[in-house]
Every structure is written in structure tokens, then in C-alpha cells.
Image (cartoon, rainbow, N blue to C red):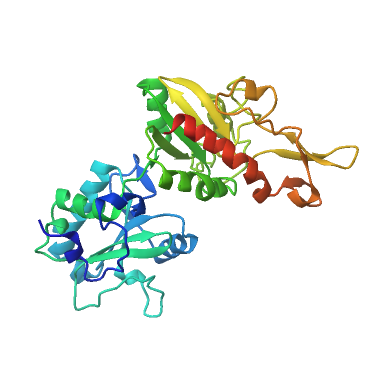
């Protein structure tokens, strides 16, 4: 069988994927999906943000979206169907972007963008904001026309995702209609600062370092019908559809006296087993106050003395903890716990949750 390295005339090759004994060096593709059954189209701005953020490891194909390219069998009849089959079969997020998205003066992010004399697509792996590998279409190579060969090529340079996006319909079925034996679910808003701290600082490095044995889903609640109104607008957490969701999925105190936390917050991670909530973690979302002595302290936390008695993964109590001035940010209307300081406590708590239930 021909070595995959021979398929890499455009590769910025590093040690990833050289041999089976170094699989830990291969990029872990960040996101899988049980929502998408097709490739995901990106704009230039969308790609630039992913590269700038440097968080997501992802697969992307650049194709000729001109009239000439659209009529070319190398994309529509050959490679694109392989990518679509891969998304459906391996539940892996794959992005595509048209060449027209790249202006002459635009940053190409290390990608080789073929000129108008060619209609061939290319395919690349990005790792932590940088191009790691790139392939150019070759009609003689089966990876561009056969799912099995493409799978082999991907596995030679990357590892499968361990976090899979789901939607409300999927989650409802997994819990209430056809309860799955055991799974984890992580609730987020895509614009939530706490969520955008939790993933790169805790979940992402944990997935890169460990092989998870438990199915792990991510659901974004910032969608119409849950957190957003029908027009896609954000009106706050008092929207009835959001309040109802928090209660239905045991995230609020109204929905679960044991595990529910106040009105319900994100990011929250739960373990469900056969339709029953087994345990729960809440990252950040503490309230900070000042006592009569002028000390700053955690006045409300998921990790209260009473609640940790019901949690099976930690005995750490954060409620009542005294904080120094360096650990808080004070504004005219509020006092908040600095993320760097709060993370020192919340990161090991979430990691202990993952150690118990994910591995």
C-alpha cells in the first residue's frame, strides 16, 4: 500500500502521524456532530476567526466555486460526496470554503490556494490555528474518491473527535424517549464568556490527553426556541422557553432540588444514565460579596457545604471562601471573581468530575 506521505506535495509536515507509536502527537479533531449530515460552509471571516482563536483542530477543503469549478467532476462528483459520507459515517465536523472567499491581498493562513488554471480542490488539517497538513487533488489517488481511503488518510494525521454537538431533539430522545445507558452532556451558549473559558482551559486539553470512554455531547442553548426568541434575538435569561428548559433538564433548583442550581447556569456538565441524572458540575457562576469586615467572599456557589454531600466527585466547598483583593474585579455595580483565580479552583473540580465519569 502506498504510504500517505507520498500524497503530501503541499504538506507542512511535522512529526504528527509518522508512526503508530506516536498517536498522542496526532491532532485530535475537536468537534464531532450528530446534528450535521453534510459539510459546513465557511466564509473567510469564519475561517479567520478559527485560526485566530487557535482552539479548534479541524478539517477543511478549499474548492473552486467558480462556474468552471462547479461543473468539474473532481469536486461535485468525486471529492465532495466523500466528505459528505465521512460526516455522516464518522460524525466528524468538516468545513469547506470556496476559493472566491480569498482576496488577492488576504492572509491565506499557510494554505496553498490554486489559481484559476486549476479546478482541483485541496484538503487540509489545522491544528491550534496553524496548517499542519495539506493535500492537493489527484484523480489517481483513491482518498479523493473512496470513503475508506479517505478515512485512512485522515487517521494517518489525526484522531477522531470526542465531543459531539447535539440539538434539543437528539438530547430529548437520549434522555426521555429512548434513554441511553450512559452519557455526558455539556451545556453552553456560544457567546458565554464562562463557556469560552471552560472549553480551551479544561475540556480541550482533557480530550487531547485522554481517551474518553463515555459518550460526550455538547448542546448550544443560544438558539431560537431555547435562549433566543423566534427571530434569533437575545432577551435575557427570563425568556419562558429558557426557564422551561432549565427546569426540564434539571439545571435549575426548580427542576431538581438536589442537583439544580438557582435559575440554572452555563457551562454545566451532567452525567445521565438510563434517563436519570446521576451527577452534575457547574463551572464558575459564583457570586461575590463583601462582608462587614470588608473582606470579599464567595457568597453563592454551586459548591456549597450542603450540595457537595450529594456530589460523588468532590468534597471541595467554595461557598464562604474568603478572597483577596487581587482575586476580584470591582465595578460600580458588581464584584466578580477574576477568571484566573476562579479557574484555579473550578478546573480541578471539573477535572475530577471528568476523571470519574469520562475515562
Which residue is at a point 12% across and 61% down the rendered structure image?
141
**Residue 220 appears left or right of 132:** right
Q: Position of residue 25 (x, y in %)?
A: 35, 54
Front position in the image: 329 or 94: 329
- How far across and how far down the image is residue 222, in percent? 51, 43
**Image quadrant in which you'd find residue 320:** top right
Apparent side of residue 147 relative to residue 211 in the rendered image (left or right): left
Quadrant in which the C terminus is drawn: top left
How far across and how far down the image is residue 295, in percent? Answer: 85, 42
Query: Which residue appears at 13% of the width and 52% of the height?
Result: 146
Is the residue 312 above or below the residue 159 in the image? above
- For the question of whether residue 191 can be seen, the reply is no
Residue in the foreground of this view, choosing between 196 and 201: 201
Q: Quadrant of residue 60?
A: bottom left
Q: Residue placed farthest to the front in the image?
A: 21
Q: Where 154 falls versus 198 (above or below)?
A: below
Q: Is residue 284 above or below residue 71?
A: above
Q: In which quadrant of the rendered image does the N terminus lie?
A: bottom left
Q: How many marks?
A: 0
- Side of 255 relative to 138 (left or right): right
- Residue reaching furthest to the right: 293
Residue 29 image point, x, y percent: 35, 50
Which residue is at a point 39% across and 55% down the rendered structure image? 57
Asked if residue 300 can be seen in this view, the reply is yes
325 to 188, vertically: above or below = below
Amino acid at each position: 500500500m502506498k504510504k500517505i506521505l507520498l500524497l503530501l506535495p503541499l504538506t507542512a509536515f511535522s512529526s504528527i502521524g509518522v508512526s503508530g507509536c506516536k498517536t498522542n502527537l496526532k491532532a485530535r479533531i475537536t468537534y464531532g456532530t450528530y446534528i450535521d449530515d453534510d459539510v459546513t460552509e465557511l466564509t473567510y471571516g469564519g475561517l479567520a476567526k478559527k485560526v485566530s482563536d487557535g482552539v479548534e483542530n479541524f478539517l477543511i477543503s478549499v474548492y473552486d466555486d467558480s462556474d468552471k469549478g462547479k461543473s468539474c467532476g473532481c469536486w461535485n462528483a468525486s471529492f465532495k460526496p466523500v466528505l459528505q459520507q465521512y460526516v455522516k459515517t464518522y460524525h466528524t465536523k468538516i468545513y469547506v470554503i470556496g476559493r472566491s472567499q480569498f482576496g488577492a491581498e488576504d492572509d491565506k493562513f499557510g494554505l496553498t490556494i490554486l489559481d484559476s488554471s486549476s479546478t482541483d480542490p485541496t484538503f487540509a488539517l489545522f491544528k491550534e490555528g496553524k496548517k499542519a497538513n495539506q493535500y492537493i487533488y489527484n484523480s489517481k489517488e483513491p482518498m479523493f474518491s473512496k470513503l475508506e481511503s479517505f478515512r485512512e488518510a485522515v487517521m494517518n494525521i489525526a484522531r477522531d473527535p470526542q465531543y459531539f454537538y447535539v440539538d434539543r431533539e437528539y438530547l430529548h430522545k437520549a434522555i426521555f424517549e429512548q434513554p441511553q445507558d450512559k452519557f455526558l452532556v455539556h451545556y453552553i451558549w456560544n457567546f458565554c464568556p464562562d463557556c469560552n473559558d471552560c472549553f480551551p482551559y479544561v475540556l480541550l486539553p482533557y480530550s487531547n490527553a485522554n481517551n474518553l470512554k463515555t459518550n460526550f455531547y455538547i448542546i448550544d442553548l443560544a438558539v431560537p426556541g431555547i435562549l433566543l426568541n423566534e427571530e434569533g434575538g437575545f432577551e435575557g435569561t427570563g425568556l419562558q422557553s429558557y426557564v422551561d428548559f432549565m427546569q426540564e433538564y434539571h439545571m435549575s433548583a426548580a427542576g431538581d432540588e438536589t442537583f439544580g442550581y438557582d435559575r440554572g447556569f452555563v457551562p454545566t456538565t451532567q452525567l445521565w444514565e438510563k434517563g436519570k441524572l446521576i451527577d452534575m458540575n457547574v463551572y464558575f457562576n459564583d457570586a461575590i460579596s463583601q462582608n462587614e469586615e470588608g473582606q470579599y467572599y464567595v457568597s453563592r456557589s454551586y459548591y456549597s457545604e450542603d450540595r457537595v454531600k450529594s456530589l460523588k466527585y468532590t468534597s471541595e466547598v467554595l461557598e464562604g471562601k474568603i478572597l483577596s483583593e487581587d482575586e476580584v474585579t470591582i465595578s460600580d455595580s458588581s464584584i466578580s471573581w477574576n477568571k484566573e483565580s476562579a479557574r484555579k479552583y473550578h478546573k480541578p473540580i471539573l477535572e475530577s468530575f471528568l476523571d470519574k465519569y469520562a475515562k
